[in-house]
Image (cartoon, grey):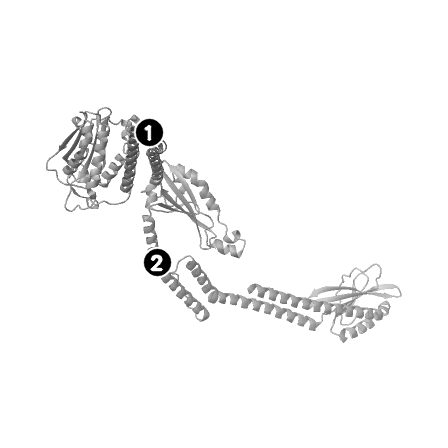
Amino acid sequence: MAVATLAVSLFMSGLTFWAVNTIQRDAQLNDTRFGRDLGLLLASNVAPLVAEDNLTEVARFSSRFYQSTSSIRYIIYTDNTGKIFFGIPYSSAEVQNSLTIERRLQLPTFSSDDHSLPSVRQHQSPNGEVTDVFVPLKHEGQNLGFLAIGINPNATVVNSSNLTRDVTIAVFVAIWAMVILGAVFNALTITLPIKELLVGVKNIAAGNFKQRINLPFGGELGELIFSFNEMAKRLERYEEQNIEELTAEKAKLDTLVSTIVDGAILLDADLNLLLVNPTARRMFVWDGKNVIGQNILELLPSELTEQLQLPLEQMMLQSTTVSDELESDETSENQALQPRISPGEYRINISQPISRIVRVLLTQVFDKQRETLKGIVMTVQDITREVELNEAKSQFISNVSHELRTPLFNIKSFIETLSEFGEDLTETEKKEFLETANHETDRLTRLVNDVLDLSRLESSKTYHLNGVDISQLIEQTLRSYQLNAKDKQLTFKKEVESNLPLILGHYDLLLQVMTNLVGNALKFTTSGGIIVIRAYYFKTKSKQFNDKSCVRVEISDSGIGIAPEDQAAIFDRFFRVENRVHTLEGTGLGLSIVRNIIDKHHSQINLISEVGIGTTFWFELALYEDNCTSSEGCANQKILPRTVDVHPNRLLF
C-alpha cells in the first residue's frame, strides 16, 4: 500500500508540475509576443525622434507607453555600443528628474542576416522571470541604437502557478505523513500480532503445541488470537492422547517384534538401522552393541553383504509415483490393491558367527500414497534345520525306496519263476523258492515296521512315562532271545543289582530298545561269544539330575566291534556296519529307533567299541517318583551327553 501510495502521489505531483510548467511556458510565449509587438511599434515611432535627438519627445512618448500598462518593467534606449542615453525608470542628464548615472547594457548578438528583427531573452528577477526584447533603431537605413523593453511576467499566472505548486507539495507531504502514520499504526496494531501469530503457527507446525499468544487486542484480532490459543490447547490435548496411544501401540509392536522367531530388521531410506529384534541381534552377535543408526552393509557378514548390496541399492532408487506407472484408471485401481514390487527372497550360506543357511526377505515400505520410499524391512530366517530335514527326508525316501526295492524284486523274481516254470521244478526247489520269498517278505515287514516306528518316534507325540521295573524288562528280553543265542552258541550273562528301584519310563518303548540292542549284539557276535546285560544303581554328577541317583543299563558283546570312523554315524538312519563288512543284512534303522526312544526318556545312548574286541552300549534312566507322572514333570532329570568311563573287564572278554 505504501508503494502504491508513493507511485500515485508521485504521478499526480508530476502531472501537476507538468501542467504548471505548460501554463508558465504559454504565459512566457504570450509575454514574448507582446514585447516584440510593443518594441516594433515603439521603435518605429521613436526612431525619427532619436534621429533628430529630440529626447524630450522620446521621453514623453515612452512615458505614455510605460504608464499605460503594468506589463512593461522598463524601457531603455542605447547607442550602438550599449551605452544608455535614456531609460524609464532611468533617464539621461538632459531629461528632468532623470538619473545622471552612466550605465551600459549588454546587447544580445543579432543575426547577421537581418538586424531589424527583435531579439528576445529572459533573466531571473526577485519577482520572477523577465522577458527582455531588443529592437534595433533604424532611420533611413542608419543604425541609431537599440530599444530594450522589459516585460513583467503575468502576475495572475505566476500567483496561480506558485499556489498550485505549493498546494501540490503540501498535499504530497500530507499524503506521506499519513502513510508513515498509517505504517506506524499498522505496525503497532496489526503487524505485531500477525508476526506473533506467524511465530506461533511455525511453532505449532514444528510440534510445539504449548505455544500461546498473550496480546491485549480486541475486535477481530482479539478473536483471532483467542481462536489460535484454543486451537493450540486442543492440539496439545490431542497430542497427549496420541502419545499415549502411540506408546501403547509401540509397546505392542515391540512385544510382537521381540517375540518373532525370525530376525526382523527395519532400515530407513539410507540403509541405516531403525529397529532390530532380539532374534536378529543373537543371530548376528549384536547383543550389547549399539547398532541403531549404523549402515546395515557395514554390520552384516561378508556373504550377506555381497549378495544383498545390489538389491538394497536398487530398492532405494525405486521411488516413482504410482500415477507414473499406470496407464488408465482401471489398471490404476487394480494395481493399487497389489504391491508395486514383490519382496526379494535370497537363500545364503554364511560362515560367521557360525555356519548356517539363512533365508532373507526384503520388502519395501512406502508412505500412505505409495509414492515415497520410507524404508526397507529385512526378515532373516535360519533355515539350516529345515534344509537338513529336507536333505534327510530326501535321503530317507531314497534309502527306503532302495531297501524296499531289493526284497520286492526278490519276491517278484521267485514268484514269477514259480509261476512260469513251476511244472519243471522239483518239490525241493519249489520249497526253497517259497522259503526265500517268505524270508524276503519277513524282511520287508521288518523294514516297514521299523520305518513306521521311527516316523512315530520322530513326531511330536508325547509319551506317558510311568514306573518301570528294569529287572523284569531285562528278563523278558533274555527270554525272547534265549533260543537264538542257543542256536548261535552264544552265552547270555545278566548282571543286575538286586532291589533296583523303579525307573521312570515307557515299558514297551524300553523293551524295543533292549530288543534292538540285544538283537544287534547277537547279529555281530560270532559263535562262542558272550553278551552281558548290566543294570546297577548309579550316582550321577550331572547338574541336570541335581546330584540324584539313577539306573545305568549296559549291553556288552564280544562281537566284531565298530570302527572309529563308523561310531559317529552308527545312529544315523539306514547306516549299517554290514554295508562295510558285507556279511549280514539289516534295515539300518534299529539304532536310530533306539536313539529316539532314549531321547523320549530325556537321556542319551552312548557306546564304546574296539574292532575285533567288542562293543558296549549304555544309557541312564531317572528314578521314578510319585510326583513324576509324565515326561514334562521330570524334565529337570534330563541327562545331557557326557563321557563315561567303562571298566576294561566290561569290554574285553
Residue 638 appears in the picture as rendered: no
- Residue 140 vertical position relative to residue 536 in the rendered view, above or below: below
- Residue 171 vertical position relative to residue 243 in the rendered view, above or below: below
Three-letter amino acid code at disc 2? Glu
Between the residue at mark 1 and the residue at mark 2, the CA separation in whole angstroms equals: 90 Å
In front of the other: label 1 or label 2?
1
Residue 414 shows which numbered tag?
A: none
Residue 311 appears in the picture as rendered: yes
Give percent across and percent down for residue 268.
42, 47
* Residue under the point 30% across and 27% down: 580
Would residue 328 appear left or right of 208 to someone viewing this image?
right
Which mark sits nearer the N-terminus, 1 or 2? Answer: 2
Which element is circle 2 on? helix
> Dot 1 corresponds to which residue?
425
Three-letter amino acid code at disc 1? Leu
Q: Nearer the viewer, residue 88 or 43?
A: 43
Give percent across and percent down for residue 481.
19, 33
Residue 431 sits in quarter: top left
Q: Quadrant of the C terminus?
A: top left
Residue 497 sits in quarter: top left
Q: Nearer the viewer, residue 432 or 90?
A: 432
Crowdedness of circle 1 by 10 Å Cα count: few (<14), some, many (20+)? few
Would residue 640 appear left or right of 135 to someone viewing this image?
left
Would residue 378 appear left or right of 520 to someone viewing this image?
right
Give percent across and percent down for residue 282.
32, 42
Crowdedness of circle 2 by 10 Å Cα count: few (<14), some, many (20+)? few
Residue 408 sits in quarter: top left
Residue 245 shows which numbered tag?
A: 2
- Name, please, the residue furthest toward the right: 140
- Residue 297 vertical position relative to residue 484 in the rendered view, above or below: below
Q: Nearer the viewer, residue 105 or 648?
A: 648
Which element is circle 1 on? loop
